[in-house]
Amino acid sequence: MAAKRILLGITGGIAAYKSAELVRLLKKAGLEVRVVMTRGAEAFVTPLTFQALSGEPVRTSLLDPEAEAGMGHIELAKWADQVVVAPASADFLARLAQGMADDLLTTVCCATEAPIAVAPAMNQAMWKNFRTQRNMSLLAEDPQITVWGPDQGEQACGDTGPGRMLEPDALASWILADATRATVGALAGKRVVITAGPTREPIDPVRYISNHSSGKMGYALARAAADAGAQVVLVSGPVNLPVPDGVAVRPVMTAQDMLQEAERVVAEGCDIFIATAAVADYRPAACAGDKIKKTDEAMTLSLVRNPDTLATIAARKNPPFTVGFAAETTDVARYANDKMQRKKLNMIVANDVSVPGLGFNSDQNAVTVFWPSGEQAIGPDSKQAIADTLVALIAEHSNKVGNS
Ligand code: PMT
C-alpha cells in the first residue's frame, strides 16, 4: 500500500459522529489511524470514542506541553502518509484556504508534506455562500489538497441541498483507493471524471422528458478506470446500478445539474473527462408548478436548448483530456468525427445504436473509437470488456498528449 498512515482531522459539525464509523472501516482495512480533533469537534463527540476505535491517543491541543514533549505537531505532520479532514467545517476550510496555523489541525496541515483530503460538511446555505465558494476555489488551486464531496440531500437542520458529508463507506473507499492504487495501473494517480446515465427534464411535478440510457456503459468505464489506478468521480443521472468499489458518485437529475456538478468536480482536479451520458438536448421552457390536466385539445410543449457539459469542459482554459461518446443510427463515422471537431475533443467513441441488442440499456456494445490521426473498432463484447479496452486506449493517448 502507498498510504498506510492516516491522520484523521475532525472539526466541529454534527457529521463528526459519522467519523467514528470511518475510523472503524479504516482500521478494519488494516490502516493505521491517528485522530486530531478541534475544540468544535469535541462539542459533538468525545475524544475517548476515537481513542477506543483507533487504539491511539487522540490529540486536541496545539499547546499541550505533555503531548508536545512526546509527539509534537511536526512529528505528527511527518508521521502521516495522508491527512483526511472529515467533517471539514466552513470555518476550518476558510482557515485552511488562508494557510492559518492557529490550532493543532491547521498547524499539522501547514507542516505536513502528505496529501490532504477534505470532506466538507455544512448547511446548504453555508456551502453555497459566496465566501465559502471563494475559499473552495482557493483550495481547488492547491495541488496538495483534494476535495471529496459534499453530497446532496436532507440535512440535520432540516434543509435539503448540497453540504452533507460523504458517507463513511464512500470516504473509506476513496482513502483505500489512494492507499492501494496510487502507484500501480495505467491510470495511477490520475483523476478521472465520467458522466453517465440519462438526464430527466421535468414537464410538471409528475412527468419528465428522458431517454433509454441505463448508465451501464459509464459505470463499466468507472470500474475499469478505478481498476487501472485512477481516482474516479461519476457524475450520474438517475440509474439503478451499484456503485463500483472505490468510485465516488455525484448524483444529478437534469442537464443543467449535470453541467453544474461536472464543472465543480473538474475544478477540484481532473486529468481525463469522459462523457458517456445521454444528456437531453432540450428541456421544457418552463416546468409547471402543478400537474398539467389533460383536455380534449392537442398539446404543444415549448422546448429550449440545454447546455452542453462536454463542450463546456473541453473549452476550459486548461482542459482535461476529453473523450466524448456519440450514439448514432446512420453515417456513424461522419457524425462522430464531426462531433469530435465541433466540441474540440481528444477522442470520440461512436456506437451504432441501430444494431439490435447493442447500445442503450444493453449489457453488450460495439464501438469505434476515433482520434485525430486514427481509429480502432472494439467489440461486439460486454460493456465491461469494451470499457477495459477503452481505458487502456485512453491511458495511452492521454499520456502522449501529457508528454508532448
Ligand atoms: O447508458 P447505457 O444504457 O449503457 O448506454 C450507453 C450510451 C449508448 C448512452 C453511450 O454509449 C453513448 O453513446 N452516450 C452518448 C449518447 C449521445 O448520443 O450523445 P450525443 O450525441 O447527444 O452527445 C455527444 C457527446 O456530448 C456525448 O459524450 C454526451 O455525453 C455529450 N453531451 C451531449 C449533450 C449535452 N447537453 N451535454 C453533453 O455533455
Image: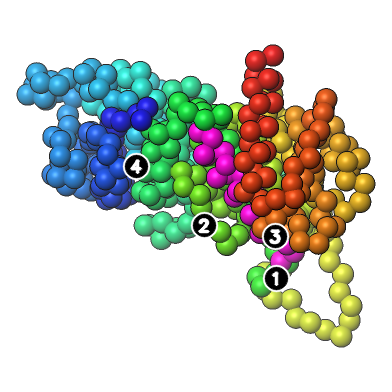
Which residue: 85% across, 57% down? 354
The amino acid type, in three-letter code, at marker 3 is Ser
Residue at the far bottom: name it.
296
Residue that label 1 marks: 207
Residue at the left extreme of this rendering: 66
The span from disc 2 to disc 3 (Cα, nearest Å) is 16 Å
Spatial CA distance of label 2 from label 1 is: 25 Å
Are circles 2 and 4 on residues that touch, CB within 8 Å? Answer: no
| Residue 16 versus residue 362 in the image, above or below | above
Give the magenta-colored segment's residue range.
208-229
Labels 4 and 3: the sequence-earlier one: 4
Q: Give me the residue at 47% from left, 56% from top.
A: 153
Between the residue at mark 2 and the residue at mark 4, the CA separation in whole angstroms equals: 25 Å
Say which residue label 3 marks: 362
Whether ligand 1 has any atom under 8 Å from the Cβ at mark 3 is answered as yes
**Relative to residue 24, is residue 177 drawn left or right?**
right
Q: Residues within 10 Å of mark 1 (few under 14, many from 20)?
A: some
Residue type beneath disc 1: Arg
Image-based side of 150 in relation to 335, left or right: left
Label 1 within 8 A of ligand 1 by Cβ: no
Residue at the spot x=50%, y=44% of the render? 247
Q: Which numbered marker is on residue 242?
A: 2
First in sequence, mark 3 or 1: give its number. 1
Q: Which of marks 2 and 3 is nearer the N terminus?
A: 2
If you read the primary sequence from the N terminus, does the residue marked by circle 2 or circle 1 appear first? 1
Q: Please tell me the numbered disc located at residue 87.
A: 4
Q: Quadrant of residue 104?
A: top left
